[in-house]
């Protein structure tokens, strides 16, 4: 039998992908946000799931060691582009959000609320309207970031804020965007294979990054040096500091965000965690 494991189709996961799937497993392409629903339904057995979705999954999954996606300081791929500096961004200015991530949307909400008060968090831009700011993640953010570095402007936006940088400035902690987890009811063989696979990754990460660089650079039409810089920034083998950053984020969300009925945390009327299921490749 072969077991489905979610794999985020972003450059930050490319070194994991270089390992190939664990024995007796296969990868299913799955956007970060959709991996929450996939784990809930049993469509996949394990995933590098957005940390923002962990409260929803607390009775469903367990972590596989200290592995995931994190950053200390700028991450380059979770960015808020805007027509003015972040410290001046509040309602009635408008935002456009990504529908791909649970953690990044919640992080932006908390950072905006801490900056100006949660009653002044910018509302969503109307459909078809030009937004004053836009949250962009993953490979798209990485490409926009490169264009911004070259030209000082992208898509009409002259300012950019790296959310991981803003987080570290506030808490002096790294930010964890995703953690590798496995369903509690997964067969023991899957749990064992995943632990062995991730331990093997930790021993080879530097070499796997180098192997991933030319593929990422070619796929995204970016220079090798830029792709390498990005892949080395990402923290995949996490530490106690990363765990502390994750705990701080979840505590902040529980205090300021959980239970709020706002369209920030819905997509087409569906709460984060109840979205569409991924499809097998």
Image (tube, grey):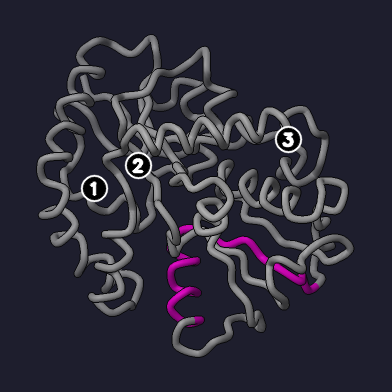
Badge 3 density bin: few <14, some 14–19, many ≥20, Cα 10 Å: some
- Name the residue beneath numbered marker 2: 7
Please give left or right for residue 13 compared with residue 23 in the image: right
Residue extent of the magenta highlight: 130-148
Whether the magenta-drawn stretch holds residue 133 is answered as yes
Placement of the N terminus among the 4 image quadrants:
top left
Residues at marks 3 and 1 touching, judged by CB atoms closer than 8 Å: no
Badge 2 density bin: few <14, some 14–19, many ≥20, Cα 10 Å: many
Mark sitting earlier along the chain (3/2): 2
For the image, the number of numbered tags is 3
Q: Nearer the viewer, residue 132 or 248?
A: 248
Residue 62, percent from left and from top? 40, 18
Q: Nearer the viewer, residue 46 or 207?
A: 207
Please give left or right for residue 181 compared with residue 113 in the image: left
Residues at marks 1 and 2 touching, judged by CB atoms closer than 8 Å: yes
Placement of the C terminus among the 4 image quadrants:
top left
Mark sitting earlier along the chain (1/2): 2
Q: Is residue 116 above or below residue 250?
A: below
Q: CA distance from mark 3 to mark 2?
A: 28 Å
Which disc, if any, is residue 257?
A: 3
Which residue is drawn at the image coordinates 19% and 69% (left, top)?
A: 214
Q: Is residue 97 above or below residue 242?
A: below
Q: Quadrant of residue 192?
A: top left
Helix, strand or loop under label 2: strand
Badge 1 density bin: few <14, some 14–19, many ≥20, Cα 10 Å: some
Residue 124, percent from left and from top? 80, 57
- Name the residue beneath numbered marker 1: 17
């Amino acid at each position: 039998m072969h077991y489905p494991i979610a794999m985020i189709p972003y450059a930050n996961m490319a070194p994991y992908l270089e390992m190939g799937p664990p024995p007796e497993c296969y990868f299913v392409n799955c956007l970060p946000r959709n991996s929450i629903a996939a784990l809930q339904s049993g469509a996949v057995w394990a995933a590098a799931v957005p940390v923002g979705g962990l409260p929803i999954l607390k009775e469903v999954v367990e972590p596989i060691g200290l592995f995931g996606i994190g950053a200390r300081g700028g991450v380059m791929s979770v960015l808020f582009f805007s027509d003015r500096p972040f410290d001046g961004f509040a309602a009635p200015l408008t935002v456009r959000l990504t529908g791909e991530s649970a953690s990044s949307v919640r992080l932006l909400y908390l950072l905006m609320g801490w900056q100006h008060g949660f009653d002044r968090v910018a509302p969503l831009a109307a459909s078809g309207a030009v937004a004053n700011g836009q949250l962009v993640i993953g490979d798209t953010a990485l490409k926009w970031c490169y264009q911004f570095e070259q030209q000082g402007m992208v898509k009409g936006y002259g300012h950019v804020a790296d959310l991981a940088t803003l987080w570290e400035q506030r808490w002096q902690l790294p930010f964890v965007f995703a953690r590798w987890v496995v369903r509690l009811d997964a067969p023991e063989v899957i749990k064992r294979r995943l632990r062995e696979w991730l331990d093997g990754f930790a021993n080879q990460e530097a070499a796997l990054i180098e192997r991933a660089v030319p593929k990422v650079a070619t796929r995204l039409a970016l220079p090798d040096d830029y792709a390498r810089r990005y892949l080395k920034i990402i923290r995949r083998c996490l530490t106690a500091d990363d765990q502390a950053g994750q705990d701080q984020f979840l505590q902040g969300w529980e205090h300021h965000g959980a239970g709020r009925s706002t369209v920030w945390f819905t997509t087409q009327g569906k709460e984060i965690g109840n979205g569409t299921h991924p499809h097998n490749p």
